[in-house]
Image (tube, grey):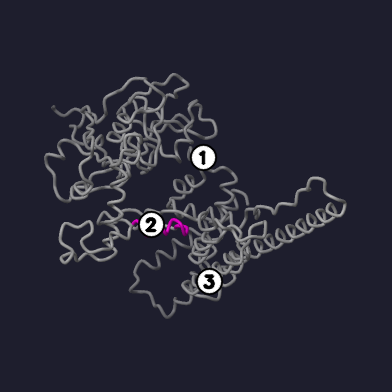
Amino acid sequence: MNKQQMTDIVDRVEGALTELSGLMADPAAVVVDEVREGFERLEKIWGAKGFIDAAFAYAADRAGAGKYVGAVHTSEYLTRALGVSKSEARARLRRGDALFAPPGNEPRPEPDPEPGETEEQRRAREEAAERIRREEAERRRREEAAQRKARDAARKAESAEKQAMIIRELEHLNTYSDPTYQELLASALDEAGRRPLEDLRTWLRGRIRQANRKGRTPEGKKDPFAALRKRKIVIGAQDADGGAHVSMYLDGAGLAILKAALAPGRLPGANASVPAEEDHRPSAARLVDQLMVILRRYLDGDSALARTGVGSVVVSMTAAELGDLRADDRFPTNTGHLLTPADILRLGAARHDIGVLHDEQGAALDLGRTSRSASLTQRLALFAQELCCTRPECTTGLCDSEIHHMVSWLAKGNTDIENLTILCRTHHPANRDQRDGAGGLGHMDKDPDTGRAGWTPPDGGPVELNETEFQQHSAGAKIRRRRPPPGDAA
């Protein structure tokens, strides 16, 4: 496909959607009996978008599309250029790999010669090696055929939502499953045309359980670490009440440890300020309270001093806010969450409180060039000043970020506040220290007008600042908002 072909196709799609949107401007005038079949057909046709999205994501990844937005990861290009969420970008890349990347599993090892092996042992070893090579070739053939079948099915699939669900469910497949990932993908996409979404999910989960039970390592053994490989904790976004859903997957040993540690909290009255007979907390809430006790004990333990602030909860607020505190105020933390005064009280008093002094522009005071690594105090000062990654549009908190020298250490850049900023682990590798725009990468620098850290595009354009809603919760941003506009009387 060339540029002109793509332009013509997009123009036709845009024209048709614009026309349809205009016709639907007054839904009360729509005669459903006359148009419903067309809308049913449109929904089925729209399923092809899932295949197209996956194909483009795969092509973009191969082209290193991050360079088009000054990044190194294709997911960053998809989120910034296409406007999709991070989770959707990852999903498209996963679908693209599943449908187009060459299938590849760890090959089975061939037997090594034994010391002093006899001629008969050598022949047996070579026959075994040849058998393994034939089986591996057959497996590759099956997987490639299954992938071709999956691609054909994905092109005809009537629902992009079903395709996305299939890829999510297949994440639970073990490394050495039987059938393989590609074979199950092809089967699931084939079933997608015959089953509604929830029934398809149930069907697929059953097949995944069977495939995991049947799977064997290249040595022909059941994988003893299958569950351990899949361990993870996922923390969701905060909702309107300030809470979030947390899910995890643990192996057997992890489950046993967790259950044993939580067990004391099940008892009425445990971790409560009332007698057992007055403890009306639900059982699930008691387990959460027990987990909080365990975590607080860890954070309050002697290991805290050795962690140099890592694993600490830091809350940022200005003196003005502290003097006019309201119950519904929300204050940012280094973990990327917003806490109410009640949340902060429940955290308890810290062993060492650290305050950060800001100037009238919201900037923190400097420290000198003492070492390459930023000190704990510097990290806290940057947190109070900037709160999160300073690349435009990023909301990643300090806990998931790193401290960056805007003028690199190798170029004699000082480790002081004026030369430091916060960059997340996605944007830090995308910074070009040489400042020459090579590879489509920009660099972090100070904005000459505001003194704030921001991103300079690879073409040398003006510094772009992070103006996200989350960044506006930083103490530095709050102080800047209180300053009178230029030209006003002091």
Give the quarter of the image for residue 100: bottom right
Query: Could you tell which of marks 3 and 2 lies nearer the N-terminus?
Result: 3
Q: Position of residue 121 (x, y in %)?
A: 83, 53
Res. 248 mark: none
Percent of width and height locating residue 223: 59, 58
The picture places residue 411, in percent across and down from the top left corner, at: 46, 20
Amino acid at pointer 3: Gly
Q: Callout 1, which amino acid?
A: Val
- Location of residue 387 with respect to 145 vertically, above or below: above
Q: CA distance from mark 1 to mark 2?
A: 38 Å
Q: Main secondary structure of the magenta part?
A: helix
The residue that appears at 63% across and 58% down in the rendered structure is 217
Residue bearing mark 2: 258
Classify mark 2: helix, strand or loop.
Answer: helix
State the separation of the CA atoms marked 3 and 2: 27 Å
Residue at image point 20% right, 61% down: 269
Residue at disc 3, secondary structure:
helix
Sequence order check, earlier mark of 3 and 1: 1
Q: Position of residue 22 (x, y in %)?
A: 40, 64
Is the residue marked by circle 2 packed among few (<14), some (14-19), or many (20+) residues within 10 Å?
Answer: few
Nearest the viewer among 418 and 263 is 263
The amino acid pointed to by label 2 is Leu
Pointer 3 and pointer 2: residues touching (CB < 8 Å)? no
Residue 253 forms part of the magenta stretch: yes
Residue matched to label 1: 72
State the extent of the magenta-drawn residues as a range. Answer: 250-261
- Look at the image and tell me whether residue 151 can be seen: no
Q: CA distance from mark 3 to mark 1?
A: 38 Å
Res 30 quadrant in image? bottom left
Residue shown at the point (44%, 76%) measured from the top left:
35
Q: Which mark is residue 206?
A: 3
